[in-house]
Image: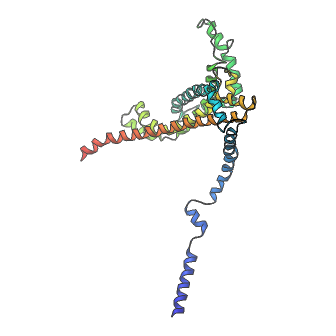
Amino acid sequence: MSAAAAGSSTGTGALTLSQRPSLRHRLADRGVDRVLLLLVPGVVFLVALFVYPFIYGLQLSLTPASGGPLASYQEFFNDSYLRDTIGITMWLALPAALVNVLVSVPIAYRMRGRFRGKRTLTTLLVVPITLGTVLTAEGLIKYLDRSGWVNKFLLDFHLINQPLLLVHNYWGVFFSLVITGFPFAFLLVLSYMSGIDPSLEKAAAIMGASWLQRFRYIVLPLLAPGLAITFCLAFVLAFSVFPSANLVGNPTGDTHVISIAAFHAAFEQFNYSLGSAIAMVMAAVMLAIIVLVLTVKIFLDLVITTSDLVSLAPAKGGGH
């Protein structure tokens, strides 16, 4: 009897072990399978080109030739000429990113549907991507310089008395950032705009909503996350400006941006610790702006959601 019971229990145990799913199946149930191996090249690329350089730069900024670990940071913030590069770069990057995003919205809103010549028009709008910063700067100098075509036209028609200073100053760099940054912002906004179901607007139009109301209450709330991401990317692209500030700006004056300060410290003064510290400050400022924009976006979503719930509350109460 005991032997039969033991045999029965042994068979049950063997059956239980054989019915237990393998480790591979248990991992697959949790979403861990061979497909994740496709992430390996991306992770290696990220570590090799972003994580390691960042850690190495941070370590280099904390090991100056003299002084404590924060000596390079203290040198940067104690020197007004270096410290002011943060404000100068912000004054260039924020307006340029804002203009690129705001101009992209109405154009993308108009171009999201199908119409004849859409591909040609889209190609023309993104052509500046193929030009590069150097060719863009050369074109700006040719058109906007004191002896350029724009000033010649304005002088010939007596619209101005003396040539306008449009390059080798703030405006030259600003125009360059707008020209080179607009295609990226436009393509991103267009992709987000194309993902909005047009039937939502058609339903609102049938209900009598104007195009402004449809845009305000349907398109804009759905587009807001994409606008926040687009602005962050456009800002990062503009904040890291370097060639334009040299070619069509005044690198020792009103366009002495933070990237130029890092370059001078590292490759002209050979103070690699100070150059790395400036790069770390640059990264911290960009990260702070990104966090601020995304936080404002989340806060506005909460405010809008709360206001919608409050507006619906009396209607529900009246129905009961």
Residue placed at 65% from the left, 54% from the top?
38
Q: Which residue reaches farthest bottom?
A: 1
Asked if 176 appears above or below 6 in the picture, the reply is above
Where residue 91 appears, as percent x and y from the top left, is 57, 25
Asked if 16 appears above or below 33 in the picture, the reply is below
Q: Nearer the viewer, residue 220 or 283?
A: 283
Residue placed at 70% from the left, 17% from the top?
142
Residue placed at 66% from the left, 35% from the top?
71
Where residue 2 appears, as percent x and y from the top left, is 52, 92
- Residue 166: quarter of image: top right
Q: Nearer the viewer, residue 267 or 145?
A: 267
Asked if 111 appears above or below 32 in the picture, the reply is above
Where residue 236 appears, as percent x and y from the top left, is 60, 34
Where residue 24 appears, as percent x and y from the top left, is 61, 66
Q: Is residue 48 visible?
A: yes
Q: Nearer the viewer, residue 165 or 255?
A: 255
Q: Which residue reaches farthest front?
A: 67
Left or right, 85 with reference to 211:
right
Q: Is residue 127 visible?
A: no
Image color mode: rainbow
Left or right, 319 with reference to 58:
left
